[in-house]
Amino acid sequence: MNRYERLNAILELLGERNRIEVEEITQELGVSSATARRDLDHLAEQRLLTRTRGGAVAHAVAYDLPLRYKTVRHADEKLRIGRAAAALVSPGAVVGLNGGTTTTEVARALVMGADMSGADDDVKVTVVTNALNIANELAVRPQVKLVVTGGVARAQSYELMSPLAERVLEELSLDITVLGVDAIDPDSGAAAHHEGEAAINRLLARRSAKVVVVADSSKIGRRAFASICPVTQIDVLITDTEAAEEDVQRFRDRGVHVTQV
């Protein structure tokens, strides 16, 4: 295993566990303690984790892991959430999708649904997105009319931002927007770690007749740096069954329809 592969493996382990010790790295990757510490120090310098005595923890708020390192986090939950969100989309609808691992699962479930079958030249749904990875997957689907916002790409999330993206969205009306978020709290609403992403997400929500937030239980009851929208603007929250019942009830008390899968 070369260094690049080790670094990826360490980030994948950290994504699964949120905390990792040097001893775990040495056992699972078959490297020396000195090598494990050097790798952790390097990743800490890149602001992809926080060093602790004897190991490292994932960043809570300040920095996101790049999207490719986050796919292993709550993978099963995100798959179920994605399918549940896709089921809310009617044939012919105009759907807004922001970036993220959960909305990527929504996009995949959307094109695999029964209502997406039919003639190749028969458009079943229009998807508006600022996510390059989602656009890449949907561009080869003839049943999808794909609209990409344009803008400046952010490497960590593959999302397009800047006034270029905002200008496109201001001209569009969406039937339903499905938003992946970094945090959602019954009091403070939905939020993202990065203010540029939050601005695009806020506009996607504002231009839509219906707003669906998809968030696994690790995002529930948490806050992040930049506000996307208040809870009053969210129609549906789809999460997994590990979300605390008291948090779920607080969302329902504020008029949000909560689905747990």
Image (cartoon, rainbow, N blue to C red):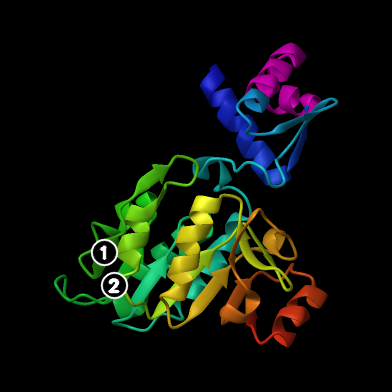
Asked if residue 40 is among those painted magenta in the image, a careful observer would answer: yes
The one of 52 and 189 positioned closer to us in this rendering: 189
Task: Identify the residue shown where x is 65% and y is 43%.
Answer: 15
Residue picked out by circle 2? 126
Dot 1 falls on a residue whose secondary structure is: strand
Residue 43: x, y in percent?
A: 63, 26
Determine the residue positioned at 31% across, 58% down. Answer: 149
| Res 261 seen here | no
Q: Residue at 16% across / 70% down in the picture?
A: 120
Q: Are marks 1 and 2 in contact (CB under 8 Å)?
A: yes
> For mark 1, what is the residue?
146
Using the image as rendered, state which of residue 97 and residue 120 is in the foreground: 97
Neighbours of disc 1 within 10 Å: few (<14), some (14-19), many (20+): many
Q: What residue span does the magenta drawing correspond to?
A: 22-42
x%, y% of residue 258? 65, 80
Quadrant of the rendered structure where residue 249 is? bottom right
Residue type indicated by callout 2: Thr
Q: Position of residue 253 (x, y in %)?
A: 74, 86
Q: Mark 1 and mark 2: span between their CA atoms?
A: 6 Å
